[in-house]
Amino acid sequence: MTLRELYCRLTGLLRQQDPDSDLEDEIASHLELAKADYLRRGVSEPEARRLAAMKFGTVAGAKEHVWEQRQVPGIGSLLQDAKYAARGMRKSPGFTLMTVATVALGIGLCSVMYSLLHEVLLRPLPGVPDPGQLALMQTPVPYPWFESYREHGKSAWTAAAFIGPVPFSIAFDGSGVAEPERITGALVSPDYFSTLRVHRMLGRFFDPQRDRAEASPALVITERFWRTRLNADPGVIGRKLRVNGRAVPIIGVGAPGFFGAGTGAFIVPEVFIAATADPGVAPELNGDVLRRTTEPAFMVLLRLNPAVTLAGAEARLDTETRNFANQREKKGRLVRLVPASTLLPLPKEARITIVMFYGVLICVVLGLTCANLGGLLLARGAARRPEFAIRLSIGADRLRLVRQLLTESAMLAAAGGAGGIAAASGIFRLLRSMQAASNPGIDGMTSGPDLQVALFTFGIATVAAIGFGLLPALVITRLDLMNAMKVNQTTALHRYRRLGLRNGFVVCQVAAAMMLVLIMGFFVVGAQYGSKTEPGFDPAPLSFFSVDPARDGLTPTESADVLRGLPERLAHVAGVESVSLADRPPLSDTPPDTMVSVPSHNTRSVALQNVGPGFFTTLGVTVLRGSDFENRDLLSDHGSGRFLPVAINQTAATELFGDADPLGSLMQQGERTFQVVAVVRYAPRSMLMGRPIPSVFVSLGAEDLERVTAGGTTVVVRARTQIGVAKLRRELAAIDARLTLFHPQTLPAYLAESDKMGSRIAAIYSPIGLFGLILACLGLAGVTAQSVQRRRKEIGIRTALGAQRSQVLRLVMREGAVMVVIGAALGYACASAFVHLLSAVAAPIAEFLAPVASNPALTIGIPSLLIALVAVACYVPARRSASIDPLMALREE
């Protein structure tokens, strides 16, 4: 075929088959010539006309042949199939709507799950060229170690170091008059941006030659910060912001989309300060941290050369680390590297767990959707058996019918794919509405399906069309023409109990639905159970706020003096009953990540919290044994060698001491020795555990007040009436004008927000289980209805012979019951195996699921609910079978 012929055929697709006078004249002339030839042979005129028409063919057939020659081969037939399928879909709006909605919702859920997986583990780090070459050390190291890695590894990598995310107190007018805000940032080595090879939009980045040790601090900001906080000011370079009480100029703006790398958290930095700057700009740099070899504060980010593998770099770094003091005798691997090419750098085991979880969910939802699509197409094809039988009997090719059915299923899947994109966008809008605040790390995850996710969506829609449209098409077109053309065909009595293709689809649906509902039930109930906090005291009179004197420009000594006098100052405010300090809010979500040991007893992981004098009295917590901390504990020096006083909750007392009296007992945590002075009724929970956490409360000491923490110091206030934020700010200003109050909140509001976390997880994952439940019910109801239709004559005969209504119901429901039992057993086994596998490979998931793994409401209630619902779905069409008129059924052929 020449290019000209191809062009003519393609343009022929755009032309309508309008009457062509020249073509009609040519056909008429051919018929006249053939007729004249027969007349010369002596044939009569009517016979000559008939023979000419037989030799030449019909006019319509000739015109159709010419039009096919004018178009691309097969395209015309495909368009004809598409038009026929569209007419058929318009004639069956209920079937079309159900099919498209099923596929759209299923593919939309798959798109959302794939999008979340894509953003966390698959999407390359935005704004960073060649992110696949990046690697991150899992544990922080001292800055001198980083310098050694950088110098000795120049042939294998370039390296940078950072501390992050780090909170900064920033006033935007540069004068300190405006109220400062807490902005997340990072302290980075001067070669951070050159290692990442990111581009700047304005100004410059840090330079190792210009930004040397104790140089004047400078700011590099992200494009998002420049656009949202500084109104995209084109003259921003040189503008000064007050950072932690110091005026710091802006020297550069990063490229759009860039917000750092390797932080391992969804809260990403928006401002960057060189770690070599004057230590006064950030408390994390105090104490000569750049020269101390005993202060592991810096994460190390590497860009590996193309010839260097991750394992090779890890082995080389491990060898280098063993050359440092006190590292030679340590056993095992000292350095672990993880790929840093994505938003969340994770070790291989964690990546496998996440991919496994979302991969199984996507496969189950997609399989459930495709099984339902196949069942619906098969049921629709069964209803069209007479039509296909007639078409086959008059000479239609079986391949032609298969192609027709595939075209119809492809159109349904394409419509479902488009609907899936719309459904995914709606789900993402729901997720965005549940976000408490804007966050560049989360915003990308909830921004909606991008091009890659859209391609994935239409890809699985194509798989659904071909894979689960072809098999029903092959089955439908293999017909017994004599029986198929009758009004109702009968089915042999011995065949209805066989697990055919249609019943196989339903078994798969029930199994997938059971698996989805159980898995989602475990995670949703586990999250809700873990997020529900039962204080054990009245939270109504309590509120809290945070202060961070170190980031407001106070020295460590000034910070300690301010924090020491703050409770006494606020206690004199009208309406205030008690004030205490803590390192984080009460009942905050804190996983047990600190190992403590009890001599001759147990070693356990506990949640460690530092609290001030009167903490339990302020909260209203019941002290079961011993007494609350006193002011002398706050003034004491914990480094004097004496035992540190601690309080433990009931969970820690049971797990560490069993039935023994813990009061006065000693505990060891690293080089520190604790002495239990109180046992309290206080039971915080963690989202990842879902059970009361063993907690140890250490009394704040003088050195603790000087120590810098990322979250600042929490001030807990018990008051008879609500104390306004303005009044609290005035009291803080009276103590020191530089103090900034942030995160003010009442404890009931804080607990309510914490409880909402479980509701948010339920809002995200519950629709997946509900979707599976609905599809299973629809599939079983459809198959039961088809079974009733196929066995209509048999049921009529049984009724005519005296079968009771209950006997007919049992007869029809028996087939559905077999499918339900088989599918439910398979789904239950698969869900249990999957949950056990996840628990085996990930300890946090095991802790998360442990409290609900044996919950009868899940292990018995969910399967019972599913079986009951699908039984109802089976009963509705079965009940109609008992109303079949035997006379009408026996008259049908």
Image (tube, helix red, strand yellow):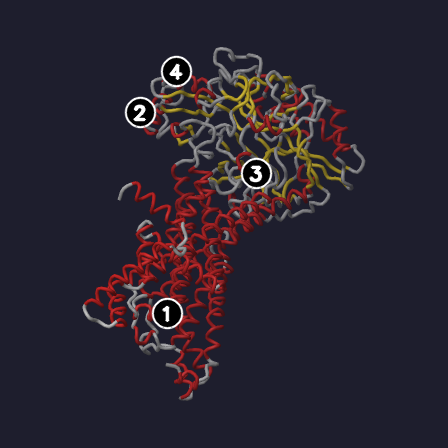
Residue 839 visible in image: no
Circles 4 and 3 in contact, beta carbons < 8 Å: no
* Residue at the disc numbered 2: 307
Residue type, mark 3 in image: Val
* Residue at the disc numbered 3: 696
* Residue at the disc numbered 4: 151
Q: CA distance from mark 4 to mark 1?
A: 79 Å
Labels 4, 1: front one: 1
Residue reaching furthest to the top: 209
- Of the residues under marks 1 and 3, which one precedes in the sequence? 1
Residue reaching furthest to the left: 41
Residue reaching furthest to the right: 574
* Residue at the disc numbered 1: 387
Question: Is 701 placed left or right of 27 in the picture?
Answer: right
- Of the residues under marks 2 and 4, which one precedes in the sequence? 4
- Of the residues under marks 2 and 3, which one precedes in the sequence? 2
Front residue of this view, candidates 604 and 838? 838
Number of other residues with Cα within 10 Å of mark 3, as a class: few under 14, some 14 to 19, many 20 or more = many
Quadrant of the drawing holding the N terminus: top left
Q: CA distance from mark 2 to mark 1?
A: 65 Å
Depicted 654 relative to depicted 287: above or below: below
Residue type, mark 1 in image: Glu
Say what secondary structure mark 1 lies in: helix
Residue 305, image x, y percentages: 35, 23
Say what secondary structure mark 4 lies in: helix
Residue type, mark 4 in image: Glu
Residue 815 visible in image: yes
